[in-house]
Amino acid sequence: MSREWTELELDALGETFNVGVGAAAAVLSRMVEGEVLLSVPELKVVDKCTALGSFGLAPTDRVCAVLQPYGGAIESNALLIFTESKSYDLVRVVVPDHLAGMQMGDLAQDALLEVANLVLNACLGAMGDLLECRLTTQVPMLLKGTAAEVMEELEGNEMMLLHMLFSIRHRDIDGYVGFLLDQQAMAVLQQAVARFLEAHL
Amino acid sequence: MKVLVVDDSKVARTIIRAVILDKHPDWSVTEAPNAAEALALAAQEAFDIFSIDINMPGVDGFGLVEQLRTLGAKGRMALFSANVQEPVRQRAADLGVAFISKPVTPVSVEALLAAVGHDAS
């Protein structure tokens, strides 16, 4: 079990997440050839139902999510989640023009997985570097269905949700990047954050 | 030299302050957690250097640079951000302020001081 997070630990975690998502946004920005707008990160312990609300989703909304399991020092999942229509729009922006008319077939799913893989790897890489813990990514999975169905695929009920809204300037595309941490992952992360603070403050 | 560090992260502010004071023990470093407090402080005293985060609740770093200029602030400004996208760097360049990438480390703080015309040595 993890102990209560101190204000400074939460602050350091938020700042670490900022650096991670900032690196991820730079990757996405190059792919969409535009600026990616980022919200201030939020961090809270929630159950699955509340997590959906935090992502601005109703349980019946159709969504596309890419779940990126990662291991190494911390084992958990990173998640990139969009409404289904916005995931099509994102794919259309990042793939060549002659593929732009495609529906969410295999090729589009592949493109979305590739985008998410690059974005989430950039994010995890930056966070791992900063906290000096090695994080290894595994094969990402595409989850499609209603928001409630997608959340059911995730293990555990209560989780720490570290998330940030991103949107693409001048385009109606937005989504969330988030980390879902169970108790064990939270405890390991907390130790890494405490070591970071000890080394830097 | 008077420095104002504006960042919503206390950890970031604390590290920036510690690195600056380590290099320049005779400088003064003031902290503000958001743009509103930064503007109130800048209205009261003149700062020589501003280190400004971009993604903050309320007015962001770009907005703060513009408002500080409207206020007549003369100090050198640098945006110090994790938002390392090229369009963001370009907006900083368009505003005529330096851009330094986070994370906040002794190396990046020294880069910030160099960017506003002060050697870390």
Image (spheres, rainbow, N blue to C red):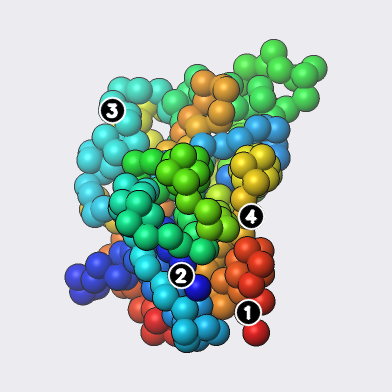
Residue placed furthest toward the left: A4
CA–CA distance between discs 4 and 1?
16 Å
* Dot 4 and dot 1 residues touching (CB under 8 Å): no
Give the quadrant of residue B98.
bottom right
Single out the mark in the foreground, 2 or 4: 2
Q: Are marks 1 and 3 in contact (CB under 8 Å)?
A: no
A36 vs A125, nearest the viewer: A36
Three-letter code for the amino acid on which mark 4 is drawn: Ala
Instruction: Please give the residue where the numbered disc 1 appears in the rendered image.
Output: B120
Crowdedness near tag 3: few (<14), some (14–19) or many (≥20) residues, C-alpha within 10 Å: some
Chain letter for the residue marked with disc 4 in the picture: B
| Residue type of the residue flagged with mark 3 | Pro
The residue type indicated by label 1 comes to Ala
Q: Position of residue B30 (x, y in %)?
A: 37, 68
Q: Is residue A26 above or below residue A194?
A: above
Which callout, 2 or 1, points at the residue further toward the start of the chain?
2
Which is more foreground, mark 2 or mark 1? 2
Tell me the residue that label 4 is attached to.
B98
Q: CA distance from mark 2 to mark 1?
A: 15 Å
Asked if one can make out residue A28 in the rendered structure from this viewpoint, the answer is: no
A89 over A35 or under it: above or below: above
